Image (spheres, rainbow, N blue to C red):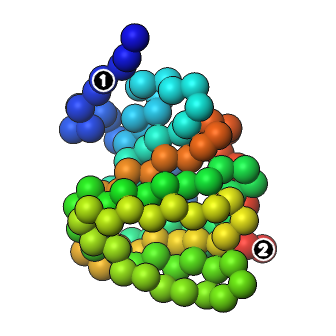
Amino acid sequence: MYDRIAIDDVEPRDIEGIEPALLPIGLELKPERMRPSVWHYDAGEKNEYHRQGEQEELYVVLDGALEATIERDDREVVELTTGDVLVVPPESWRQLEAIEESRVLVVGAPNVKDDAIHEE
């Protein structure tokens, strides 16, 4: 069996105090082993600087351009554009900031409740 949905048919979900806008495709598809979402960034928007407790995260830039700040031993900033794919292990700190309006597919695995850890 399989499940299918068009990203443009998913209603955005506003989460208080969090940018960018979230398209909760995982809530629609209900996968067992991964936690997918699509994030829509306006130019200049960024998510919170964070790392994960368990989840490895895969980022696929669907359209736009962003800067990804990643820190484990060293801090590195990489530019991501349409079609780029990035995997970040749970223990690495990360943040995405939109250079221009962008959409990013984010897939976390395993499928656990949001286990983001934010800087104090």
The single residue placed furthest to the top in the displayed view is 1
User: Which quadrant: the C terminus?
Assistant: bottom right
- List the residue tagged with mark 1: 4
Element assignment for label 2: loop
Q: Position of residue 51 (x, y in %)?
A: 67, 64
The circle on residue 120 is 2
Q: Position of residue 109 (x, y in %)?
A: 60, 43
Residue shown at 43% from the left, 82% from the top: 78
Q: Amino acid at mark 2?
A: Glu
- Spot occupied by residue 74 in the image (x, y as percentages of width and height): 66, 88
Q: Residue at x 27, y 71 (%)?
A: 81
Image location (x, y in percent) of residue 21 = 38, 53
The quadrant where residue 12 appears? top left
For residue 22, above or below residue 65: above
Q: Quadrant of residue 94?
A: bottom right
For image coordinates 54% across by 86% down, the residue present is: 76
Query: Does residue 10 lie above or below 73 as drawn?
Result: above
Q: Is residue 59 left or right of residue 117?
A: left
Q: Residues within 10 Å of mark 1 (few under 14, many from 20)?
A: few
**Could one spot residue 19 in this view of the protein?**
no
The answer to whether one can see residue 79 in this image is: yes
- The structure residue drawn at horizontal position 56% and vertical position 47%, both measured from the top left corner, is 108
Asked which quadrant contains residue 117, the reply is bottom right
Identify the mark nearer the N-term, 2 or 1: 1
Image check: 102 left or right of 120? left
Q: Give amino acid for label 1.
A: Arg
